[in-house]
């Protein structure tokens, strides 16, 4: 029986998924090997009985297995029995839950029926209450409407009586109340009685408008107009006008303002002598006197919301602007800058005074109107036009409107001074003349200007540069007072013109004759700038190497610093012009060409300084070809290196001192000077022929010495010790590396010409066939034609792939610096290098390199 059970168990598929096995292990953790999912019977038996000697414990193990099987059977039996009881208990609980749900459903049904009955009872109770509320509301509305109607009837009757007696104070209060009551009865206008009352009120309003206008006309234009004094009756009439059509208020204000300015229009008419620009002081004096008298007498008669004094001031400005415009049209030829500036100053001061005094004034009326015009499409046309002029309506829905807290421009800004804008050309022409005279004065004084020695704290910028830009600043401020930024276009052209003249006649003319006589193109660009600098270097080379004196060096440095200052200030001037100009003019404002002109002068100064120092070093570099390089032993550094070091020590500190405020361009000067000297040194190395191996050693020694001199060029003879810039150091090392590589190729010993070509291509991959030919000449190779042909054949493939193969010889290569000598330096004859038996071993090469390095260290040329 047990065998059958075991067979059935073996047939069961007890392979569970990994997630099931993991869940079982989390719920029932066990260390028993039988519970492991990967349990293996054979491995378990081998573990329990690892050797034959352990089989004597097999009886104990079998007894242990029987006990474990018995325990497991008992546990399974207990679990099965408990599961049987659980099934019975589950059925009982399910039946109890179903009975409880049935009972709960019956109770819910009962509650729902009772709630429906309660709702029906509430509806029956509230139905009568709603009817009573509706009746009460209708009754209240009827009583209120009848009261309003009674008040309206009584108000109309009272208005008729008050109108006849001209009791405007009571009319103002009563009319406002009547209009409010009429608003409440607006929905009953279809009723004949209400419509009739509405017509009566409109008739009363119309009669009041005519009556009040007649009263004001009689007061200001009647027989007693000259002795008129403000009365309480007219002051109260103004309160009534505030409740009438806005046209009435506008008519009264216009009449009052016109009356006050009648005398002014006659005194300062376009044909009178007092109307000219020179008499603007009289206009201001008349207005201030009239405004003070008006505020003392008539202003109190009008409500403050009318802002009659401010409107009087604005009308005065409009009349003045019209009269001045007319006068300038008739006498355009008599307008001069002094008169224009004086008139503008007086009127702008008056505008500023009015802006401060009437800070909250706006042309359009912001006060709400309680009265309604009979024409719903009729607006206050004049106020609407003024509102549009002061605050243009934004018709673009995608542009946000003005922020609520943003300052509103006062209508007094430019109220008078706008008339001067058409005549800004007069001021611009005057500025043109003034700047022309000033630059001629600067040019004349520059001829006698002394470029003296400066201290370290001082700047050697020519003072005329600061004076020019100070004048420009004052001109811009003065121009912006005359008109807004829309007219800046003409002024910018004048400023550009005189910037170019200042650059040519003052800054560039201060250079020594060699630099100043070269014509500068009008529209400078990089191609033309390169041509100018080439002319500078050509002029220096064509003569007998003319040298600059110390005063000339100071002059060139001062011009360089001045050009840098002018270039920077021109950029700031352009930014300020764009800031102050109208947005539509910003794209057209550019001073880039003027900046390029100053930059061209700056670059020309650097070229002059570089060519000056280079010309001092030229004789020393030229003397390299006169040395006999077929020497038998090396010595100290050659005299030409010492001469170059002496010239640099004597000339560079003076340049550095005078460019202490412009470190950037002193660094550029050092870069260009080092590149020029190194480039010429490499060219001279090619000309040193014939040359022996010892001569190559001497040249390598000179390379290290010259490199040490060039590395210290920026800080030579400086009291403050600092390291040269890293970019400069890398440039010098790269430039000198080419000469070292050429010498390494020349001094090498080769078994065949092919080895020479391979080494040349490896060390100088960017060299040309002309460079290779020079190397052959330095080595003294006789059969150069065949070697050149072999070189052409070997480099045909690489020349099509490398853009540097056909390039000319440059001062610096792209290869990293190599050691001073990596190849043997013994070369007694050109034929020795081609002897196969003379090729040295690597150990022999290294010994010679070490010997050369020891020699250079002993002479302190390398560290």
Image (cartoon, helix red, strand yellow):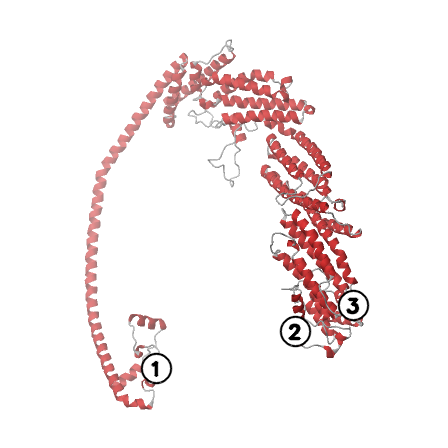
What is the crowding at mark 1: few (fewer than 14 residues within 10 Å), some, or many (at least 20)? few
Give how far apart the Cα atoms at labels 2 and 3 are: 26 Å
Secondary structure at numbered mark 3: loop
Give how far apart the Cα atoms at labels 1 and 2 are: 70 Å
**Picture quadrant where residue 448 is located:** top right
**Picture quadrant where residue 783 is located:** bottom right
Query: In the rendering, at what x and y percent does residue 425 appear?
Result: 67, 31
Query: Disc number at residue 199?
Result: none
- Tell me which label, 1 or 2, sits earlier in the chain: 1
* Horizontal side of residue 292 vs 457, given as left or right: left
What is the crowding at mark 2: few (fewer than 14 residues within 10 Å), some, or many (at least 20)? some
Give how far apart the Cα atoms at labels 1 and 3 are: 91 Å
Q: Is 270 in front, or is 334?
A: 334
Residue hosting label 3: 690
Query: In the rendering, at what x and y percent does residue 813 appear?
Result: 68, 62
Tell me what residue is drawn at x 58 percent, y 22 percent: 319
Query: In the rendering, at what x and y percent does residue 129 appear?
Result: 23, 35
Secondary structure at numbered mark 1: loop
- Tell me which label, 2 or 3, sits earlier in the chain: 3
Query: Disc number at residue 40?
Result: 1
**Picture quadrant where residue 834 is located:** bottom right
- Compared with 744, 350 (above or below) is above
Tell me what residue is drawn at x 74 percent, y 55 percent: 617
Secondary structure at numbered mark 2: helix
Viewer-side label of 1, 3:
3
- Compared with 636, 11 (above or below) is below
Residue hosting label 2: 846
What is the crowding at mark 3: few (fewer than 14 residues within 10 Å), some, or many (at least 20)? some
């Amino acid at each position: 029986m047990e065998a059958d059970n075991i067979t059935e168990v073996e047939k069961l598929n007890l392979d569970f998924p990994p997630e099931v096995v993991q869940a079982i292990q989390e719920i029932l953790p066990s260390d028993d090997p039988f519970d492991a999912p990967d349990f293996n019977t054979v491995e378990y038996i081998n573990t329990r009985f690892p050797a034959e000697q352990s089989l004597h414990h097999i009886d104990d193990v079998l007894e242990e297995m029987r006990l474990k099987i018995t325990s497991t059977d008992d546990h399974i039996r207990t679990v099965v029995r408990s599961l049987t009881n659980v099934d019975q208990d589950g059925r009982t609980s399910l039946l109890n839950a179903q009975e409880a749900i049935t009972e709960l459903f019956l109770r819910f049904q009962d509650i729902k029926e009772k709630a429906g009955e309660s709702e029906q009872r509430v509806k029956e109770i509230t139905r009568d209450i709603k009817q009573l509320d509706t009746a009460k509301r209708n009754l209240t509305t009827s009583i209120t409407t009848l009261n309003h109607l009674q008040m309206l009837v009584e108000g109309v009757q009272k208005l008729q009586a008050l109108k006849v007696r001209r009791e405007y104070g009571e009319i103002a209060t009563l009319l406002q109340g009547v209009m409010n009551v009429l608003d409440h009865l607006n929905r009953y206008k279809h009723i004949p009685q209400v419509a009739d009352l509405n017509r009566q009120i409109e008739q009363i309003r119309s009669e009041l408008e005519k009556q009040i206008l007649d009263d004001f006309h009689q007061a200001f234009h009647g027989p007693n107009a000259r002795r008129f004094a403000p009365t309480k009756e007219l002051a109260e009439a103004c309160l009534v006008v505030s409740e009438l059509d806005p046209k009435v208020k506008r008519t009264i204000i216009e009449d009052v303002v016109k009356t006050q300015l009648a005398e002014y229009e006659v005194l300062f008419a376009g044909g009178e002598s007092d109307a000219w620009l020179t008499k603007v002081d009289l206009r201001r004096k008349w207005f201030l006197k009239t405004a003070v008298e008006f505020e003392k007498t008539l202003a109190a008669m009008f409500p403050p919301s009318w802002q009659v004094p401010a409107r009087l001031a604005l009308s005065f400005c409009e009349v003045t602007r019209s009269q001045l415009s007319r006068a300038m049209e008739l006498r355009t030829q008599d307008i001069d800058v002094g008169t224009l500036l004086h008139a503008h100053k007086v009127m702008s001061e008056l505008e500023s005074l009015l802006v401060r005094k009437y800070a909250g004034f706006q042309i359009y009326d912001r006060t709400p109107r309680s009265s309604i015009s009979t024409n719903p499409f009729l607006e206050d046309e004049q106020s609407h036009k003024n509102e549009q002029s002061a605050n243009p309506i934004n018709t673009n829905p995608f542009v946000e409107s003005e922020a609520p807290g943003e300052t509103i421009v006062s209508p007094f800004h430019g109220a008078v001074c706008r008339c001067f804008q058409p005549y800004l050309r007069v001021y611009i022409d005057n500025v043109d003349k003034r700047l022309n005279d000033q630059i001629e004065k600067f040019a004349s004084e520059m001829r006698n200007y002394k470029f003296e020695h400066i201290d370290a704290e001082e700047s050697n910028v020519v003072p005329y540069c600061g004076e020019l830009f100070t004048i420009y600043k004052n001109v811009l401020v003065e121009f912006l007072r005359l008109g807004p930024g829309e007219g800046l276009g003409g002024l910018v052209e004048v400023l550009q013109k005189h910037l170019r003249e200042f650059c040519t006649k003052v800054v560039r003319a201060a250079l020594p004759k060699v630099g100043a006589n070269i014509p500068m193109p009008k529209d400078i660009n990089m191609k033309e700038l390169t041509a100018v600098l080439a002319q500078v270097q050509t002029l220096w080379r064509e003569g007998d190497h003319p040298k600059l004196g110390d005063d000339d060096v100071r002059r060139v440095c001062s011009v360089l610093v001045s050009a840098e200052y002018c270039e920077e200030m021109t950029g700031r001037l352009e930014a300020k012009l764009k800031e102050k100009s109208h947005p539509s003019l910003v794209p057209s404002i550019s001073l880039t060409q003027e900046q390029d002109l100053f930059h061209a002068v700056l670059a020309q100064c650097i070229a002059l300084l570089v060519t000056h120092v280079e010309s001092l070093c030229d004789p020393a570099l030229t003397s390299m070809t006169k040395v006999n390089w077929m020497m038998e032993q090396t010595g100290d550094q050659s005299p030409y290196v010492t001469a170059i070091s002496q010239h640099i020590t004597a000339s560079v500190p003076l340049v550095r001192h005078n460019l202490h405020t412009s470190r950037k361009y002193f660094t550029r000067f050092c870069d260009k000077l080092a590149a020029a000297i190194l480039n010429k040194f490499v060219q001279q190395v090619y000309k040193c022929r014939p040359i022996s191996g010892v001569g190559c050693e001497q040249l390598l020694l000179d390379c290290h010495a010259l490199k040490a001199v060039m590395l210290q060029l920026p800080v030579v003879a400086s009291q403050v010790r600092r390291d040269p810039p890293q970019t400069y150091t890398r440039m010098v090392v790269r430039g000198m590396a080419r000469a070292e590589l050429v010498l390494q190729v020349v001094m090498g010993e080769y078994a065949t010409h092919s080895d020479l070509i391979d080494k040349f291509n490896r060390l100088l991959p960017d060299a040309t066939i002309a460079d290779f030919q020079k190397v052959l000449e330095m080595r003294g190779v006789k059969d150069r034609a065949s070697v050149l042909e072999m070189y052409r054949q070997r480099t045909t493939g690489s020349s099509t792939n490398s853009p540097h193969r056909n390039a000319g010889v440059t001062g610096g290569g792209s290869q990293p610096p190599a050691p001073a000598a990596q190849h043997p330096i013994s070369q007694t004859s050109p034929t020795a290098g081609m002897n196969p038996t003379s090729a040295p071993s690597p150990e022999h090469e290294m010994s010679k390199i070490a010997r050369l390095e020891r020699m250079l260290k002993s002479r302190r040329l390398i560290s």
